[in-house]
Amino acid sequence: MKKWNKKLLLEDGTQYYGYGFGSQEETITELVFNTAPVGYQEILSDPSYTYQTVVMAYPLIGNYGIAKEDFETKKPTIGGLAVRDYNDLPSNFRSIGTLDEVMKQYHIPGISGIDTRKLVRKIRDYGSCKVLLTDADTPLAEGMKKLAEYEIPKDAVSKVSSKEIRICAAKQEKYLVAAIDCGMKENIIRSLNARGCSVMVYPWNTSYEEIQKQNPDGVFLSNGPGNPEDVKPVLELVQRLKGKYPMFGICLGHQMIALAYGARTYKLKFGHRGGNHPVKNLETGKIEITSQNHSYAVDCESLKSTRLEVTHINLLDQTVEGLACKTDQVFSVQYHPESAPGPQDSGYLFDQFIQMMEENKHGKAN
């Protein structure tokens, strides 16, 4: 039997032994889990997983390789992957390489062969925590010392955001959307482009005056990693932009809209990550199965003193999943309607944004 060469060491001293794949470097990150049965490439390349090691609840990972078209960012920044069974012989006509090869290229460590069911249950019961992915023979005392001394950085958004303004043009442009990039997934841009929106992507710390120069038809606030309270330049920008342009926010963007209106956010025990979360649309009564990836949520009680109304709720734990201020033409959702990976129940939200921009255009013309 092959000898274990890697281990995960949790803050409470629990150790999970396995086999390394991808990069062999040692890392300390936050440990979270994802329940999606497919989409490991999109998860690997989602900037929202910066400084996080993801435990994949689905047991077989790597079996369909890596497809060129499925990356969610050009340079993945996930902290690591922990899986039950890693497959290094993918079967997929679209595959251009293995998961192991991509992880080595971008310095992402992985560990396989661990009991992921047990680890997922532990995170569920005790919450997310810091984890050290290290060599199997690293002494326990040494590993615990490293964990105790390490603080997970708060610069995740600045790390993954665009460093300069770029345009992602639609084939037939009908609208210009200013997108504030806090770690935006590429499929959001694809979803907007497909609906006739050229997307001007701005760095996270762009000024209000810079946005005004282009006079966009709408403003989009992207997903991204970390605590929304750590991205104060974006909160200040939202406060100045709201009510002036139609605005749509997803995930971190949703949380920043809430904060900009005076609400509060809080950290969930173990977050929501997966492709099977039921959300109720309070305006239509319909249930959507959604793709989710977030650690923080909006405090429902704190919304009472704002002009925001709740439009969607999570049926698993009743957390806030959607907000709107109709007078300001602002709305947001906590989940991912671009569905990468995940179900496609919520694509209508992009259409709602288009309709809002169209109505705003006609209003200005009249």
Image (tube, rainbow, N blue to C red):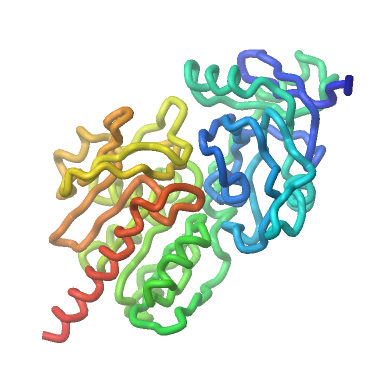
Q: Give coordinates of residue 142: x percent, y percent.
A: 78, 18
Q: Outermost residue, left direction?
A: 366
Q: Residue sitting at 18 percent across and 74 percent down? A: 359
User: Horizontal placement of 308 versus 295: left or right?
Assistant: left
Q: Give coordinates of residue 219: x percent, y percent.
A: 34, 67
User: Horizontal placement of 176 versus 119: left or right?
Assistant: left
Q: As displayed, is residue 65 above or below residue 123?
A: below
Q: Give coordinates of residue 243: x percent, y percent.
A: 20, 65
Q: As displayed, is residue 155 above or below residue 245?
A: above
Judge by depth and name the residue closer to the eye, 139 or 40.
Answer: 40
Q: Give coordinates of residue 65: x percent, y percent.
A: 71, 50
Q: Residue sitting at 54 percent across and 31 percent down? A: 33
Q: Find residue 334 and report its image quarter.
A: top left
Q: Residue sitting at 15 percent across and 41 percent down? A: 305
Judge by depth and name the residue closer to the eye, 365 or 263.
Answer: 365
Q: As displayed, is residue 244 above or below residue 282?
A: below
Q: Residue sitting at 44 percent across and 50 percent down? A: 231
Judge by depth and name the residue closer to the eye, 125 or 209.
Answer: 125
Q: Find residue 364 and report its image quarter.
A: bottom left
Q: Is residue 338 visible?
A: yes
Judge by depth and name the residue closer to the eye, 9 or 233.
Answer: 9
Q: As displayed, is residue 209 above or below residue 308?
A: below
Q: Quadrant of the N terminus?
A: top right
Tally the numbered discs: 0
Q: Quadrant of the C terminus?
A: bottom left
